[in-house]
Image (cartoon, helix red, strand yellow):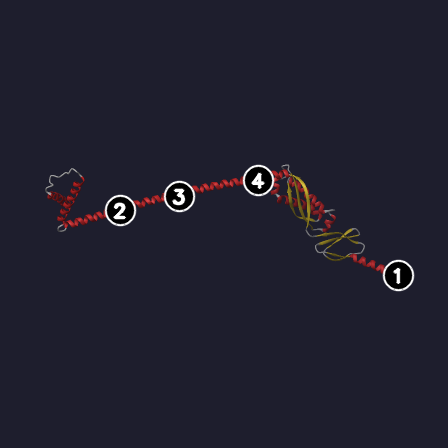
Amino acid sequence: MDAQSIVFIVIGIIVFFILLSCIKIVPQRSAYIVERLGKYNGTLTAGFHFLMPIIDKVSYKHTLKEAAIDVASQSCITKDNIAVEVDGVLYLQIIDPQKASYGIDNYGFAAIQIAQTTMRSVIGRLDLDKTFEERETINTSIVNAVDKASDPWGVKITRYEVKNITPPQSIKDAMEKQMRAEREKRAMIAESEGQKQAKINVAEGDKQELIARSEGEKQKRINEAEGKAAEIEFVATATAKGIREIALAINEKGGIDAVNLRVAEQYLGEFGKLAKTNNTMIIPSNMSDISSIIATATSVLDQTKK
């Protein structure tokens, strides 16, 4: 192989590599900034591209996907003069690759600095207790501030999330004591409410018991009164019926003789009892004539009949 052939081979290899370097394949969701002779020439999107040899150059490569940037922990002073350590995560996305290349030297670093500055400003307007409650407010304030500043950079701030808010150890101990006292307070209140409700329930139960007992006693007395009334009515009815039967029997034939005989028997019976129970006996003046006693009883019956 002569020298001329070697020169052609070398030139061919050089040309091949030059042409190969001019071929650019841009991945999906990426953008390449091309400069021609040091001046912006265009933006290459996803796909196959061929550049002019020597005069064209890919100066910047950007990803168009959303990126998460960690914001380092920093010390912030709250409104009530408590130093807290706050860190977070910033989410951003390039929407204009040309501005991201020429608008600022390092858009990620700049976005972090603005986020930290805004965070210190927002935390300084809140009390310590509010910093834990107003995370959403802090996030929104930082997003608005950084997004406004990053608009000339071709960068869109999508969101910001506060990760940790860490107060000093002494404040942690005080907060823990406060929370413990608050829990004990709630426990005592709950216990007292339970005791109160228990007493109310017992009193209500006693009240219902007394009412039920009085109602039962009332019903008992009503039932007894109704029973006595029914008994009296029944006795009166039976007595009246017996009297009517006696009256009818007297009016029948031989009724008066039966009455006389009955009166004489009862008189003698009662007089016999009196003789057994007393040492001294009182004898009526007309004892010798029992017929007079019968006549007296008969006259009473006659008057009753009339």
As drawn, 170 above or below 51:
above
Where is the C terminus found, in terms of image quarters?
top left
Which mark, residue 4? 1
Residue 100 is situated, as x and y percent measured from the top left of the image, at 72, 49
Left or right of 293 on screen, residue 143: right
Which residue position is annotated with label 3? 209
Which residue position is annotated with label 4? 180
Residue 184 is situated, as x and y percent measured from the top left of the image, at 54, 40
Q: Amino acid at mark 3?
A: Glu
Q: Secondary structure at mark 3?
A: helix
As drawn, 117 above or below 20:
above
Asked whether the residues under the numbered discs 4 and 1 touch, taking CB atoms below 8 Å apart as contact, a structural biologist would say no
Asked whether the residues under the numbered discs 2 and 1 touch, taking CB atoms below 8 Å apart as contact, a structural biologist would say no
Q: Residue at x 53, y 41 (%)?
A: 187
Left or right of 296 on screen, residue 105: right
Q: CA distance from mark 2 to mark 4?
A: 75 Å
Which residue position is annotated with label 2? 231
